[in-house]
Amino acid sequence: MSLNKTDIRKIRKKRARLRKKLKCRFCPDGVIPRPVYVDYKDVKTLKQLVDRENRILPRRRTGTSAIYQRAVRKAVMRARFIALLPYVADE
């Protein structure tokens, strides 16, 4: 069975709709708690938010809300500065 371009496009659209909506891991029940802070000493959480090359993952990949994505960036930079996280991947 061969699929033409329109069939492939429909299948991709359907898969995109079926994909689970990402939720921010820092916001309990969708409410943003104040003050907004991500602990830079929590290396386990920060490692989930960077890829293999130690680049910070974008919001569309992690589901982090915009306000927390900024806090994550600040936390990763602080952790790198005090050598809890590496700047680049080990080769």
Image (cartoon, rainbow, N blue to C red):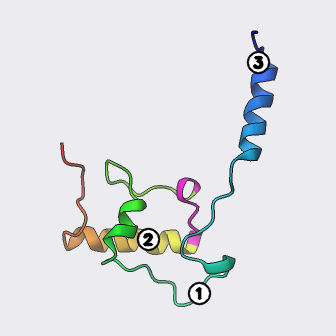
Q: Where, by quadrant of the figure, is residue 81 drawn?
A: bottom left
Residue 33: numbered disc: 1
Report the residue marked by disc 3: 5
Indicate whether 7 appears above or below 21.
Answer: above
- The numbered mark, 2 or 1, whose residue comes first in the sequence reads 1
Q: Amino acid at mark 3?
A: Lys
Q: Where, by quadrant of the figure, is residue 48 drawn?
A: bottom left
Tell me if label 2 and label 1 are in contact, CB under 8 Å: no
Neighbour class for label 3 at 10 Å: few (<14), some, many (≥20)?
A: few
Residues under labels 1 and 3: Cα distance? 46 Å
**Which quarter shows the N terminus?**
top right
- What is the x, y in percent for residue 88? 24, 52
At 32% across and 54% down in the image, what residue appears?
54
Tell me if label 1 and label 3 are in contact, CB under 8 Å: no
Neighbour class for label 2 at 10 Å: few (<14), some, many (≥20)?
A: many
- The numbered mark, 1 or 3, whose residue comes first in the sequence reads 3
Magenta span includes 63 = yes
Report the residue marked by disc 2: 72
Q: Secondary structure at mark 1?
A: loop
Q: Secondary structure at mark 3?
A: helix
Residues under labels 2 and 1: Cα distance? 15 Å
At 19% across and 48% down in the image, what residue appears?
90
The residues colored magenta run 60-66
Q: Secondary structure at mark 2?
A: helix
At 24% across and 58% down in the image, what residue appears?
87
Outermost residue on the front side: it is: 1
- The numbered mark, 2 or 3, whose residue comes first in the sequence reads 3
Q: Amino acid at mark 2?
A: Val
